[in-house]
Image (cartoon, grey):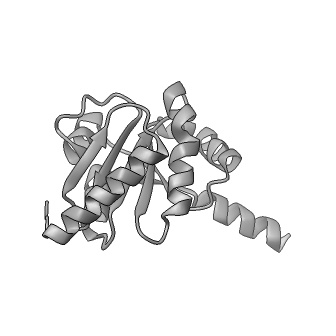
Amino acid sequence: MFGTLLLALLATDLVVEVSPTQLEEEIRRSKTPVVVNVWATWCRPCVEEFPEVLEFARKHQSEAKVMLVSADFPSRKKLVEKFLKEQGVAFRTYLKQGSDEAFVATLSPQWSGALPATFVFAPGGKLVVWFERKVTRAELEDALKRSKDETEKGGKR
């Protein structure tokens, strides 16, 4: 019984709501590069790229913070949790809260809002590169290298 309760508690912490302000704060506070992947369960390209993003996250967990942000409606939270469990995600992920416009402005004013979208920030919050399409692990690794180069230059938001 205790084990079941513990698993239930852990599962509820898998997906937490995040506002644009909270997301921006997480990005700015990070001492490592931040990769924000915005996706949705209903987005076929998002689902197709998910294993690549997850593989990147696992490989670079000590040198980059990967934030998976679902653009699903809050009413679909259980479906998001189910998808993440099926994919083997064991770290905290996020569910977008608030207006689409606020998220666009937080991540990149040039972003149309189309999914999937991935943003790579240098420590301190400077946007280094972003993709408004499916992304590969190789592209993410190149973007991580670019964010580290930006860090050495002392780039800030």
- The part of the image, by quadrant, that contains residue 48 is top right
**Horizontal and vertical percent for residue 24?**
26, 57
Q: What residue lies at 48% left-to-right and 46% top-to-bottom? A: 137
Q: Which residue is rendered at x = 50% and y = 47% of the image? A: 53
**Is residue 18 visible to the viewer in this orientation of the structure?**
no
Q: Tell whether 85 sits left or right of 119.
A: right
Residue 129 horizontal/vertical position (percent)? 25, 46
Whether residue 137 sits left or right of residue 18 in the image: it is: right
In this orientation, which residue lies closer to the viewer: 101 or 49? 49
Position of residue 156 relative to residue 103, above or below, is below
Task: Give the side of residue 89 with respect to residue 57, left or right.
Answer: right
Q: Which residue is at a point 54% across and 61% down the rendered structure image?
A: 59
Using the rendered image of the protein, determine whether residue 89 is visible from the camera's viewpoint: yes
Nearer the observer, 132 or 43: 132
Q: Toward the viewer: 137 or 81?
A: 137
Residue 97 location (% of width, % of height): 37, 45
User: Number of callouts in the render?
Assistant: 0
Percent of width and height locating residue 76: 56, 36
Residue furthest right in the image = 1
Quadrant in the picture for the C terminus: bottom left
Q: With respect to residue 30, does 132 lie above or below?
A: above
Query: Residue shown at 28%/65% (left/top)?
Result: 148
Quadrant for the N terminus in the image: bottom right
